[in-house]
Amino acid sequence: MRYTKITSPSNPHIREAIAVKEKRSKYKHRAFIIEGTHLLQMGLASGAAIKRVFFTGDYASKREGRILLRHVSKTNAEMFEVTAPILSKLTDTETPQGIVAIASYTPLKLEGLQLKNSPILVISDGIQDPGNLGTIIRTSDAADADAVILLPGTCDAFMLKTIRATAGSIFNIPIITTDADALIEWLRAKNIRTAVTAGNAPVSIYDADLRGHVAFVLGNETQGVSDKLRKAADIVIRIPILGRAESLNVAVSAALCVYEAVRQRITKVQR
């Protein structure tokens, strides 16, 4: 296994990795950080373009570390052993696992999205909490949705906190960034109905027909769905709240919507 040792935090590769972590403009839509064994394993399995891997000597001495590093060595990734203090500069966790990678990516566009039969899309309209967005991506992947679409105001799907919250699903489902006007036009051209939730909607999510092409719009945690997308919606549905809670977390709402659409498709097949 060939690798280079880095002992200085001013090394150009370390400075570049920090710039990627901090999402500086040059790298914001070109690369992202993968932290930890599990996420790197998933990235490698998905064919993610791993460019560089940084690891500590302690990590390399462990069995799981040796196994993963042997796997990495079979790719074109550059490998660097670094000190623990240097590695900590590349992470944002209190107890780093000892390995970090840089992966490059090219933002996907709506025009290139391949849709399945009866597609399900999940749209983030300004969701700002990385945990919420990451959970929505994970849920969408679990439900085999076609893509997660991010509109302006949404937090970065490729920041460390969001990636961790996806538990690796960031590598399994298309993530597309666009604006509201382009999205509305594209949805209409594809005959995909847009669905939004509202507490006062007359139709319950369990009574609405969600078996066809559908895109669920999830709004900002405080302000909800924007007026533009609410006006463009084809379906307005209500998620029943039977207890005393005022509202549902946006990630929970996304899960209920997506899995109700999945349930209806399964029921239709069984019939």
Image (cartoon, rainbow, N blue to C red):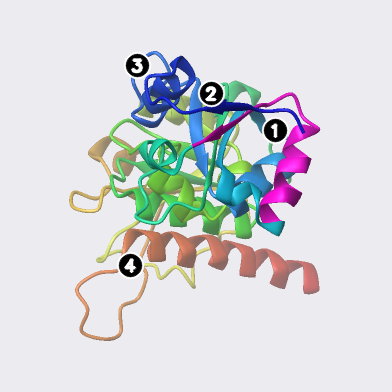
In front: 255, or 160? Answer: 160
Amino acid type of the residue that numbered disc 4 sits on in the rendered structure: Pro
In front: 73, or 21? Answer: 73
Q: Cα distance, mark 3 to mark 2?
A: 14 Å
Q: Earlier in the sequence, mark 1 or mark 4?
A: 1
Label 2 element class: loop
Question: Label 4: which residue?
Answer: 202
Question: Label 1: which residue?
Answer: 114
Residue 172 appearing in the image: no
Residue 197 appearing in the image: yes
Location of residue 53 in the rendering, given as x and y in whole percent from the top left corner: 60, 33
Circles 2 and 1: CB distance less than 8 Å? no
Query: Which region is colored magenta?
Result: 64-82
Circles 3 and 4: CB distance less than 8 Å? no
- The numbered dot on residue 25 is 3
Amino acid type of the residue that numbered disc 2 sits on in the rendered structure: Pro
Q: Choose mark 1 or mark 4, whichever is in front.
A: 1
Quick check: 154 above or below 207? above
Location of residue 244 in the rendering, given as x and y in whole percent from the top left corner: 20, 84
Label 3 element class: loop
Q: Is residue 29 left or right of residue 261?
A: left
Label 1 crowding class (10 Å Cα cut-off): few <14, some 14-19, many 20+? few
Amino acid type of the residue that numbered disc 1 sits on in the rendered structure: Gln
Q: Choose mark 3 or mark 4, whichever is in front.
A: 3
